[in-house]
Image (cartoon, rainbow, N blue to C red):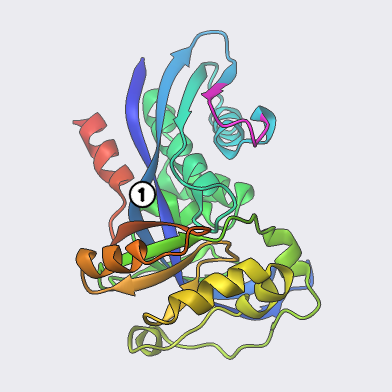
Amino acid sequence: MSGAGWPAPAKLNLFLHVLGRRADGYHLLQTAFQFIDLCDELDFTARSDGRIVRHSECHEIPEAADLAVRAAGALRAAAGVGAGADIRIRKRIPIGGGLGGGSSDAATALVALNALWGAGMPEPELLRIGLTLGADVPVFIAGHAAWAEGVGEHLTPIDPPEEWALVVHPGVHVSTARVFQHPELTRNTPAITIRAFLEGGGANDCEAVVRKMHPEVGAALDWLRRYGEARLTGTGACVFLRCDSAGKAEQVRDDLPAHLSGFVVRGCNRSPLRDRLNRFRA
């Protein structure tokens, strides 16, 4: 059995606060995730030999380290499935940009292969498997814009405005691990409420550290803030400016300096992965 055209959407962190650090080293966070209409696309074909084989033009990430491949293996082990899969990945989400491409690919692999293999794993179990792969994976499985707490696993659905945005990539790769290990990272921001965020509260606690590690990110933020309240997504490197129309976002994009690349997207509160799953079931 095969399945083509399974989307893996990118996300924006509309804010990111670091509240503290647990004894095991994991950080306690508050953030708001919203999907955008930029997606990787994955195709799956079941194999009878039990092998998980990736087909991709992206060679920056070794096959064994690819989160989609790891997700398929974790699902197969948890469900006791004997089948394998060919996974074809068409990458459109920049790698290392803070847009969640790898986590989203993993979530799509879990959701799609659970259906294609007939594994029958309930969503709470998929969420559990996803969390072992990365803190961002569960929100992509759940499929709705969310307020996230804990290490990112406690999700509350939210419906922020589905605005347009210009996303700008400064051309550098930011290591999330290095940011969270940095001694100057703020780790004591007071918790806020969902209402306070929706009324305009929140910032990104990682910005100061990322600016110090990668001045190119700070320069991109400074340029974008000439047009409005730009923010870093996740630990970067991408920065974004939310706009009230596609035309406004395109106008700012057309002014970008030559050394910066940007693309116009729209926020979406419901993941297209959920719609693809419903079409498969139908």
Residue 220, horizontal then vertical, whole percent = 53, 70
Q: How many marks?
A: 1
Mark 1: few/some/many CA within 10 Å (<14, 14-19, 20+): many
Between residues 238 and 43, which one lies in front from this camera angle? 238
Which SS class for mark 1? Answer: strand
**In the rendered structure, which segment of residues is drawn in magenta?**
54-62
- Asked if the stretch drawn in magenta spans residue 66, the answer is no
- Decide whether the magenta segment is chiefly helix, strand or loop: loop
The residue indicated by pointer 1 is 38
Vertical relation: 205 (above or below) 13: below
- Asked if the stretch drawn in magenta spans residue 61, the answer is yes
Q: Is residue 63 left or right of residue 138?
A: right
Give amino acid for label 1: Leu
Pick out the residue farthest to the front. 258
Instruction: Classify the position of the C terminus by image quarter.
Output: top left
Residue 175, horizontal then vertical, whole percent = 69, 58
Between residues 101 and 195, which one lies in front from this camera angle? 101
**Is residue 76 at all visible to an observer of this figure?**
yes
Q: Residue at x 25, y 30 (%)?
A: 280
Residue 83, horizontal then vertical, whole percent = 51, 16
